[in-house]
Each structure stands twice: as C-alpha cells, then as structure tokens.
C-alpha cells in the first residue's frame, strides 16, 4: 500500500496520520483517518479512537470498505492477501470464533509470503492463480509447520513456548477459511470468479479415535481432583477448577468452550433455577453450527451451581477484608484446565493426545450403552436443533428424560466408587476474629 500521504498506511483516498500542530508536532497520540473532501475543498478527518497503529489500520480498512465500489480495473488487481484481510475486517472479527478464524487466515498468509519469497507467485497473486497443485503445496508446507504457543518471559517479552505437530484437519480448516474469504469477495463484487477449490472433510483426514474412559477411570479422575497427586501432591485445592470442569462435563456432556462459558450471573440468563434447566448458550450470544442446547439440571449439578458465585469453572482464594476484619472466599473464573488435565492424564495413564473433550465422548458412548434414546442424546449433545414447535418441550418434565436417567445412573455408579467426593466439599474452619457476641464473622465457603 502507498503511504505517501500519512507515512503510515493508505488505502484508496484515505490515509492514517496524527493531528499535528503548525510545526508538525502531534497534538495527541490517537490516530486519525484522513481524506480530501472535494465538495468542501479541504481535508477531513475521523478519529480511530486508538493509539495502536494496528487497530487504527483495521479501522481505516473498515472505513474504506464501507464506501468502496469496485470497478472492472479494481477487480483485475484484487489479490488473495487483500481478500483475506478484508474478509476478517468485515466478517471474521465479528464472529464468536474470531480468534480461530484469525489463526487460520494467518497460516494461509504465511504460506503466501513463503511462496512469494521462493519466487513461485505471480504479482499480484490473484484468486484465479489458485489451483489443486497450489493447495497440495500448502498442505505439505503446513503439515511441516508445528503449532507454537507463545508466552511472556521474565522481562515481559513474548517468546516461543511449547510446540505440537499441526494436524491435517487444522490444515484443511485454513483452506475452508480461504474459500470463505474468496466467496465473501465475490459477493462484494471485488472479484468476478471464485476458483472451484476442494477441501478434504474432517472424516477424510482424521483417523477414527475409539478410546473411551471407563467408569473406573472417571472415578479415578474425581479422586485425583480431590486428593491430588504428581505435581499437585498436597495441593489438591489447586485442582478445584479441573474438578468443577469434570462435574459440568459429566452432568451436561457440553463441549469445553460451553463449559467455560457456564455462569450463574442473572444477566446471562443461563441458570433457569425455577425450571431446573441450564442454557449452555448465554443471552446475547448467537448460536453457531456447534449448537448449545438447554439441558436439565440434576441434583448434583444443582448443588454445584448453588456453590457458584459467577463462573462455574473457577479457582478460589482467600481474601482478607480489612474494613470488616473478615476473610472471605473469592472465586475467579478460568478459561483453561490444561495444566491440571495434563498432570492427571499422565498420572492415570490416559493416552497422549486426548484433552478435556474426552469426557464428552466417553459420556456419550456410556449413555448409549445405558439405552439413552438416540434422538434425545443428539439433543443433549447439541447435534439436533429444536424446531420452533419443539422449543416448549424444554419445560416438559420428560424433556431428555432417558438421557437424564442414564446420567443419574452413571452418577450412582460414581458415588459407589468415590464415596462422598462428588458434591462440593466444606472447608475446615480457619482461624479468624470473633465478634463481641462470640459469632464468627468469617465467610468460609469452599467449593
């Protein structure tokens, strides 16, 4: 992109710059979108509301695309990289799965850069240039590129962390995202043709994984989160979030992201206490292809929900309130149980490569074995979406009744193997001030 006008970023007749004084010095650190208004015969500006140049560039892209009407000449030079960027700005970043979309597009962009550096791309690289041979090169390159996590070092700088092999299914997801970006450009009339790209289905590239947890293994998991072991020996309290995850997964069969979204906050409208139902999809969140159903709340889940202040999957810490001279338990929501899960998986000798979603797979298989109705089980898993006329069924006492009976049966088996480890545990009394009337003013709740 030309940067003649603002020295930072320009697209079409719009450019990015600061507001400057007579001597050229910036008057503040916010970036502005500038353009020349021919009707008024002067420059105009609009604030981006940020001093982050990357975010400001995205704002300029949004502003430009809102007014852009492509001509035949524009269509002739509209390249693939621009299509990926515009797709994310106009659509991808507004989706619930924005981070996943961004990662898939980034992988594709990295490959385009790799091909350009190797001299294998025409300039500009247009959608017409993509064919099956190009996609085969992308697959080969992507599978050789590991997924590397990033972390901050002691000085606060981002550095490469652990890595893992990239799967064939994640590679195909980038191709699916490429197709979505090109279709988006076609609908916006920025390109005249979308090449007939073919991606491989998940079933075609992913081997069938048949490993499932037994009831004994599920009981050992519960026991592990209560007693602790390995890195958590003597520190079982640090496994509370993992224990809560296991309870939610066993009682709801929900996907991991839905479990981490479970909350009892009234404004989220998830816990329908009077109806003994829980909506895995909070109010205001649009449903996706991975449907989040409303599920019945059994007695065990009800007890845990009662023991929750905000987020279901959480850790706890003691906080001393100086003004009232009391200690209280504060719950803090978490978005991952990976550390605890990995330690537990190693201790219990669960095969490598299995994450927390294994509970969902294992419970679904177990409930089928216990004769849960397949139609109801599909509804519990979110594989079947209720039609308009069926929505009222959630208030029926028999709603998903065979699934719930099978879950209750599983919980009964787990109680026999784990004793009293399923309900929330009560924290032993802690030393604290006692008021003049001899009453302990401390809040000592434990989950």
Image: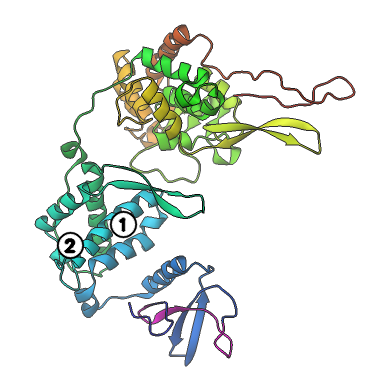
* Most foreground residue, 274 or 349: 349
Residue at (15%, 68%) from the top-left corner? 119
Q: 431 and 421: which one is in front?
A: 431
Looking at the rendered structure, the secondary structure element under dot 1 is: helix
Q: Earlier in the sequence, mark 1 or mark 2?
A: 1
Checking the image for residue 194, the label placed there is 2
Where 343 falls versus 406 (above or below)? below
Tell me where residue 63 sits by quadrant. bottom left
Q: Is residue 14 magenta?
A: yes
Q: Position of residue 286 (x, y in %)?
A: 42, 46
Identify whether 242 is placed above or below 422. below
Quadrant location, the N terminus: bottom left
Farthest residue in the bottom direction? 41
Q: Position of residue 18 (x, y in %)?
A: 52, 79
Residue at the outermost top position: 416
User: Is residue 316 among what the camera can see?
Assistant: yes
Q: Is residue 32 above or below residue 324?
A: below
Q: Can you give x and y, in whole percent of width and height, for residue 342 in the image?
A: 39, 30
Verify CB contact (< 8 Å) between mark 1 and mark 2. Answer: no
In terms of depth relative to the viewer, which is nearer, 365 or 51?
51
User: What residue range appears in magenta?
Assistant: 10-25
Residue 392 visible from this viewpoint: no
Residue at horizontal 23%, vertical 69%?
79
Image position of 424 (left or right of 246): right
Q: Residues within 10 Å of mark 1 (few under 14, many from 20)?
A: some
**The stretch drawn in magenta includes residue 387:** no
Residue 163's disc is none
Q: Which residue in the protein does label 1 denote?
A: 106
């Amino acid at each position: 992109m030309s940067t003649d006008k603002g020295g930072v970023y320009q697209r079409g007749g719009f450019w990015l710059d600061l507001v400057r004084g007579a001597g050229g010095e910036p008057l503040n650190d916010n970036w502005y979108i500038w353009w020349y208004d021919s009707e008024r015969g002067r420059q105009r500006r609009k604030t981006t509301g940020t001093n982050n140049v990357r975010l400001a560039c995205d704002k300029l892209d949004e502003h430009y695309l809102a007014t852009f009407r492509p001509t035949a000449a524009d269509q002739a030079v509209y390249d693939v990289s621009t299509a990926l960027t515009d797709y994310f700005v106009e659509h991808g970043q507004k989706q619930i799965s924005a981070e996943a979309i961004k990662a898939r597009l980034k992988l594709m962009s990295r490959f385009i850069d790799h091909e350009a550096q190797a001299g294998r791309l025409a300039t500009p690289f247009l959608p017409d240039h993509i064919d099956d041979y190009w996609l085969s090169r992308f697959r080969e390159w992507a599978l050789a590129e590991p997924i590397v996590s990033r972390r901050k070092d002691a000085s606060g700088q981002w550095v490469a962390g652990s890595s893992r092999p990239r799967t064939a299914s994640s590679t195909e997801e980038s191709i699916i995202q490429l197709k979505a970006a090109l279709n988006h450009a076609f609908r916006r009339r920025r390109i005249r043709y979308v090449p007939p790209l073919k991606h491989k289905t998940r079933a075609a590239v992913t081997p069938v994984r048949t490993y499932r947890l037994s009831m004994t293994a599920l009981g050992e998991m519960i026991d592990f989160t209560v007693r602790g072991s390995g890195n958590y020996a003597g520190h079982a309290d640090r496994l509370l979030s993992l224990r809560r995850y296991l309870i939610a997964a066993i009682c709801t069969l929900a996907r991991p992201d839905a479990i981490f979204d479970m909350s009892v906050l009234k404004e989220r409208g998830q816990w329908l206490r009077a109806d003994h139902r829980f909506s895995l999809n909070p109010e205001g969140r649009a449903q996706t292809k991975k449907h989040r159903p409303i599920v019945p709340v059994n007695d065990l889940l009800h007890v845990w929900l009662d023991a929750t202040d905000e987020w279901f999957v959480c850790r706890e810490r003691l906080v001393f309130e100086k003004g009232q001279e009391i200690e209280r338990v504060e719950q803090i929501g978490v978005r991952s149980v990976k550390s605890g899960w990995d330690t537990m998986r190693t201790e219990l000798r669960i095969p490598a490569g299995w994450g927390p979603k294994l509970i969902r797979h294992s419970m679904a298989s177990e409930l089928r074995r216990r004769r849960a109705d397949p139609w109801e089980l599909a509804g519990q898993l979110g594989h079947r979406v209720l039609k308009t006329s069926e929505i009222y069924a959630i208030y029926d006492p028999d709603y998903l009744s065979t699934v719930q009976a099978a879950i209750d049966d599983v919980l009964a088996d787990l109680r026999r193997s784990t004793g009293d480890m399923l309900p929330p545990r009560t924290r032993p009394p802690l030393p604290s001030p006692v008021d003049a009337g001899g009453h302990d003013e401390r809040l000592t709740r434990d989950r």
